[in-house]
Amino acid sequence: MENTLLRYILITLCLTPCLAGCSGQGFLSSAVTGPEPCLAEVEIDALCAESACKSHMEDEDGIWDCNIYIYDSAGTVFSHSFQAFPSAQKGLAKIKTQLFLEEEYSVYMIANAGYDTGSMELEELMDYKLYLSYPDGNLRGMAMAGSGDVRIDRIGQGASVQLERLMARIDISVDTGRLDPGISFQPVSAKIGNCARCTKAFRSYGVLSRDEIFASGYSADLTEAGYDYDSGSRISLYCMENIQNGPDTGFCTYVELYVKYRSGSCHSEGKGLVYRFYLQNGKEYGTRKNTVYSVTVRPEKDGLSGNDSWRLDKSNLVFSED
């Protein structure tokens, strides 16, 4: 499996004066008295940056809403704001807030949550869990989050915060080149099992109960999607971060590939032959946010033998009578 960063969003801050006290003369005040703190209006441009790995979902560049949390150098809440847009901002979203010049801030952003997440203390925000309405993301846009330290010393100075996707992408391909002649092996559908409903926006997380898992995870009908495994096509599935110690926890994310199968001795009925993969990277099981996992199903001989990479459910096979 390969780990690759998905597309990210670049947040660029541009400043314009919002108070009369922020005029040029204000910065030439006497060193004895010192200038008064200068509060400036901040216009945030959310710019979609190119990446080697792109999402295949609709509105992959769309920003529908954004929660912005700003904390001062002591970690105290400075401000929280929420802005929703009437339509997806295609690669560019302008959001306004205010900052004092020559002050240190930490800026945290959650995009496409779908709602106002409310004001929070910093530690509360670090442990905040973002819940999805649907296995493949929110109704509008893919959930993203990011943070950065910001200090603005002069009007017009820029700063940036990168938002990364809170979901992982699993690319599945099938190679039937090692099957025996006469074996019919047709992938029909794929889905994610133990698909997480929530994750922490700013910390790593693994689900702790069945309540945090969708009853039915993200799925794809390969017959409707025009999937052609003979041409090397890949099907992509999506899920939120879910880091586990192993399958024994009962919450480890896995992928199931359903296959219509036929050989000289048996054929599949119902949901077919099922290949099950527990996603892992080294000793770590599960999925990490903003990561791409590549899985290749490569059955050999009669295709009915599992290996260290997958488990095989043959309960739907019907064997011919001798």
Image: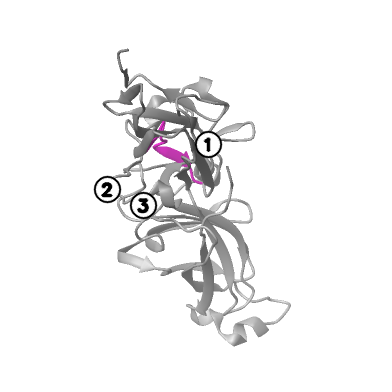
Which residue is label 3 attached to?
Answer: 116
Residue 67 included in the magenta stretch of the image: no
State which mark lies toward you, 1 or 2: 2
Rounded to the nearest angstrom, the CA distance separating label 3 from label 2 is 36 Å
Q: Is residue 112 left or right of residue 288?
A: left
Q: Earlier in the sequence, mark 1 or mark 2?
A: 1
Indicate the amino acid at tag 1. Answer: Tyr
Q: Which residue is mark 1?
A: 205
Which one is nearer the viewer's eye here, 300 or 156?
Answer: 300
State the image quarter where residue 106 is shown: bottom right
Q: Nearer the viewer, residue 186 or 77?
A: 186
The quadrant holding residue 186 is top left
Residue 22 sits above or below residue 225 on the image: below
* Residue 9: % across, % down: 50, 62
Residue type at numbered disc 3: Asp
| Magenta segment boundaries in residue numbering | 191-201
